[in-house]
Image (cartoon, grey):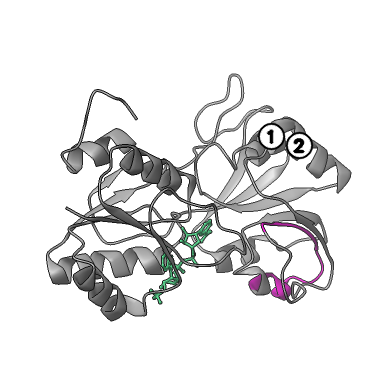
Amino acid sequence: MKVLILGGTTEASALARALAEREIPALFSYAGRVTAPKPQPLPTRVGGFGGVDGLAAFLAAERITHLVDATHPFAERMSRHAVAAAERLGIALLALTRPPWAPQHGDGGKPGDCGQQGDRWQRVDSIGAAVSALSGPPQRVLLAIGRMHLAAFAARPEHHYVLRLVDLPVDPPPLPRHTLTVDRGPFTLEGDLALLREHGVERLVCKNAGGAGAAAKLEAARALGLPVVMIDRPALPPRLETHAIDDVLEWLGHMTDRGV
Ligand code: NAP
C-alpha cells in the first residue's frame, strides 16, 4: 500500500499526522501556492503534476495504491484531475472534505427568513455571480476569497475592498481601492470583529469553504448584522467522500485502537 495525499488544507495535515503516526507509507503533495507551506511528517513534493496525464504518470511511477484528495473544496481543477487519473489507472480514490457552512437563523426566525440575529446570506454559484451581486452604491467590502480571483472584482471598481491574504502578493491587487492585511488562520471572533469594525466593512464576500478556521468572519458578520455574499462550492463528478479521518483510516484498512 502507498497513499498520496493531495493537500493544502487543515484536514490534509491532520491526515498526514495520522498516517505518519501509524507508519502507513504515504506521500504528501502541495500545489506550491504559499511561500512557506506547513512542514509535513511525510515525504513531500511541491508543484503541479502537469494535468491528468502528469498526475497519472506520477501515480504509476510512485506505485500509489490509494489517492486521498484532501484539497480545498474550491480546488476544482485538481479534484477533477484526481477523479480522472484514478479512474484511468483503477486506483482507489477518497475525498476528505469539510462540511459546508449553513446559514444560522435568528431567534424565532423560520428557514429562509433570517431574523435579526440570523445570517444575512445571499448565495451565489460562482465568482462572476458574486461580482454581479455587488451592484448598488459604493461600499466597503471584505473580500475573503484568496488571491486567485481578485481581478474579477475590478469590474466593480466603485467599492473599497478589504483583502486578507496569506502572503503579501508580488503584484499589487488589481483593485483601485483596497486595503490589504496579511494574516493566516485560524481566525478568532474577537479578531474578526475588530477587523470588520476597524475597516468599516459593510458587506462580505466569501467562499463556502466550511471548517472552523475561517468561520469567525461569519460569526462576526452575524453579530454586526452584515450581509454576506456566499459563493457555493463548485459541483464535482461523483466520488467517494468523507469528512472524517477515521473513515479514511478504515478505508485504508488501518483503524487501530490508538485513536487519531
Ligand atoms: P486548482 O485550481 O484546483 O488547481 C490548479 C492546479 O494546481 C492543478 O491543476 C494542479 O496542477 C495544481 N494543484 C492543485 N492542488 C495541488 C496539490 N495539492 N498538489 C499538486 N498540485 C496541485 O487549485 P487551487 O484552487 O489553485 O488551489 C491550490 C492549492 O491551494 C490546493 O492544494 C488547495 O488545497 C489549496 N487551497 C485552495 C484554496 C481555494 O480557495 N481554492 C484555499 C485554501 C487552500 P497540475 O494540473 O499541473 O497538476
Residue 165, percent from left and from top: 69, 58
Q: Look at the numbered discs 1 and 2 and tell me whether their residues touch, using CB distance below 8 Å.
A: yes
Residue 134, percent from left and from top: 69, 61
Q: Quadrant of the C terminus?
A: top left
* Location of mark 1 (residue): 188
Front in this rendered view, residue 207 or 181: 181
Mark pair 1, 2: CA separation? 5 Å
Quadrant of the image occupied by residue 166: bottom right
Residue 145, percent from left and from top: 62, 58
| Residue 72 forms part of the magenta stretch | no
Residue 140, percent from left and from top: 81, 55
Query: In the drawing, does residue 17 fall left or right of residue 177?
Result: left
The secondary structure type at the circle numbered 1 is: loop
User: Start and end of the magenta stretch?
Assistant: 152-166
Whether label 2 lies within 8 Å of ligand 1 gets the answer no
Q: Is residue 65 above or below residue 60?
A: above
User: Which class describes the residues within 10 Å of circle 2: few (<14), some (14-19), or many (20+)?
Assistant: few
User: Which class describes the residues within 10 Å of circle 1: few (<14), some (14-19), or many (20+)?
Assistant: some
Q: Amino acid at mark 2?
A: Gly
Is residue 243 visible from the viewing direction of this image? no
Q: Report the residue at 19% width, 43% height from top.
A: 252
Q: Report the residue at 74% width, 75% height from top.
A: 174
| Residue 163 forms part of the magenta stretch | yes
Q: Report the residue at 83% width, 73% height from top.
A: 176
Q: Amino acid at mark 1?
A: Thr
* Location of mark 2 (residue): 191
Q: Report the residue at 23% width, 57% height from top.
A: 238
The secondary structure type at the circle numbered 2 is: helix
